[in-house]
Image (cartoon, rainbow, N blue to C red):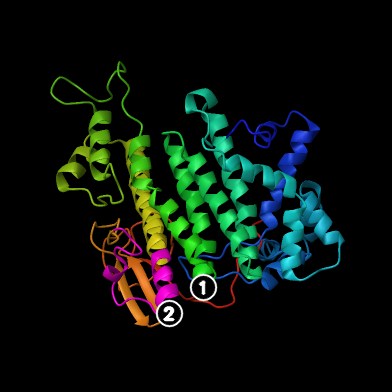
Amino acid sequence: FAAGRTNDPITTDQTDCCQELNHRFLLAGHLPGGGDWRRGIVVDLSRWQQALRAEISEGDRRMARRYGLPADALAGGAVASQASVSPAWTALRARPAGTPLEDVRFLLDHDRAVLDEIRRAARRPSAELRSSAELGVEELQAQLARLKGWVYPFRASCVAGLIEGDAATAFADLETMLRLGEAAGSQPVLPGALAKMSIIELSLSPLWQGLVEHQWPDAELAQIENRLRRVNPVADVRRSLPQPRAGEPPVHSGPDRPSRDGVWHSIYLARLDPDGPSARLQLSAAERALLDADADAAARALLDGMEQTIGKTVESQNGITLARTACALERYWLANRRYPETLDELVPGFLPKPPVDPANGGPLKYRREAPDRFVLYSVGVNGQDDGGRITASGYSGRTEPGDSVWRNHPAQSAVTDTPQR
C-alpha cells in the first residue's frame, strides 16, 4: 500500500511536485466535519459554508479575544497563510458561492485524480504498510499521519453522498475509510493500532448519520456489519504491546524477583482478551501492588499512559460493537418498519449472536423508546450503568461518569463541525 504512487512522493519534500501534493492534502482542514455520533450531532453544511468563506474564522476570533486584540487583527495573515498552502481552498474562494453541497464537491473535485488513486490502492488485496523495521520510527509515524489525513476527504464525500441521496457513493467512501484503517493497523506496533482506532472512529459518524436518516440499503448494511465484525481493537493492541526482548538485561530485577518489564507486560496482557472484544478495565489489588513496586515518576507516567490506552481501546471497541448492532437494528427496521423489543430478536437473522459489551463482558444495554426510536449503549470505561447518559469527553479513554451511547436520532438537529483548521 505504501508503495502506491500517491503515498510515495508525499512522504518527502524533495521536489516541487511533492510539495504541491502535500499542499493539496491540507484542504482537509477546510472540509466539513463528519458530525459526532457520540454526542448525537449531525452535519449542517450551510453553517460549514459560512465558516469556510468567512474572512475571519471563529478560531481567529477566539484567539483575538484571548489576547485582547481587535476581531479582524488576525484575518489578513490567516487568509494569506491558508491561500499559500491550499490550492483548492484558494480556488474556492475565488469563485462565487454556490450551494453548500456545491462548495463541498468543488473542493473534493479539485483533487479527484489523487483521491481516486487512493481508492484504487485501498482496494488492493494486500493494502498494508511496510514493517516497522523497514520504515523506522519517524517514517512510520509520518505514514500513519498521512493515512489519517486521507480519511477527511473521504468522510466529507461520504456525508455529501448521503445528503445527495447517493448511497452507493457514500458506501464506497465509507469502505475506503475502513480500508485505510486496516492498512494503518496492518503491522503489530502500538502506534499503528492506535491510528487504526482513530480512523475507525472518524468513519463511524457518517455511518451513524446515514442510519439516523434511514439512507443505507439492506445489502450495504450487511456488508458494513460484516467488515466491522472483523475489526478488533482489543486483539490489535494486545498483539502490538512491546514485549521484553530476549537477551536484554532486565530492568529493576534481582535474584529474588522477576524483571519489572516482564511483570508489567504480563499484567497488561492478562487484561486484554486475546480474541477480543472485551478487556478488564480495573486492576486487582495484587496487580496494583506489583505495578506500584519500584515505580518512579517516569514509570508512573508510563503506567498512566497504558491505563488510558486500555480505556481508549475499550471505547473504540464499544463504538465498533455499537455500530455493528445499529446496522443490524436498521436491517430489522427495514424489514419490519419497527425496532425490536430486545436485541435477542436480531439473532440469528441479523446477527450471529447477541452482542457483548466490551467494557464488562455482559450484554449491551438496549432500550426501545418508541417503535421508531431506541437507545443503545455500553456501560463505558467506568464500568457502571449510568442509564444511557453520555460521557462528557467522549472518545478519550478516561474513567468518568457516563456511558458510550448510540442513539438513532440526533441530540441536536442543526449542528456541524466547523472547518477543521
Residue 299: percent from the left, percent from the top? 33, 36
Q: Quadrant of residue 97?
A: bottom right
Residue for badge 2: 337
Question: Of helix, strand and loop, which one carries label 2?
Answer: loop
Q: Residue at x 39, y 79 (%)?
A: 338
Residue for badge 1: 214
Viewer can see residue 380: yes
Residue 158: percent from the left, percent from the top? 61, 60
Residue 249: percent from the left, percent from the top? 29, 18
Position above or below: 107 against 269: below
Q: Residue at x 35, y 53 (%)?
A: 314
Q: Is residue 150 magenta?
A: no
State which quarter of the image contains the C terminus.
bottom right
Mark 2 vs mark 1, foreground winner is: 2
Amino acid type, label 1: His
State which quarter of the image contains the N terminus.
top right
| Total number of numbered discs in the rendering | 2
Residue 312: percent from the left, percent from the top? 39, 51
Depth check, front residue: 94 or 308:
94
Q: Earlier in the sequence, mark 2 or mark 1?
A: 1
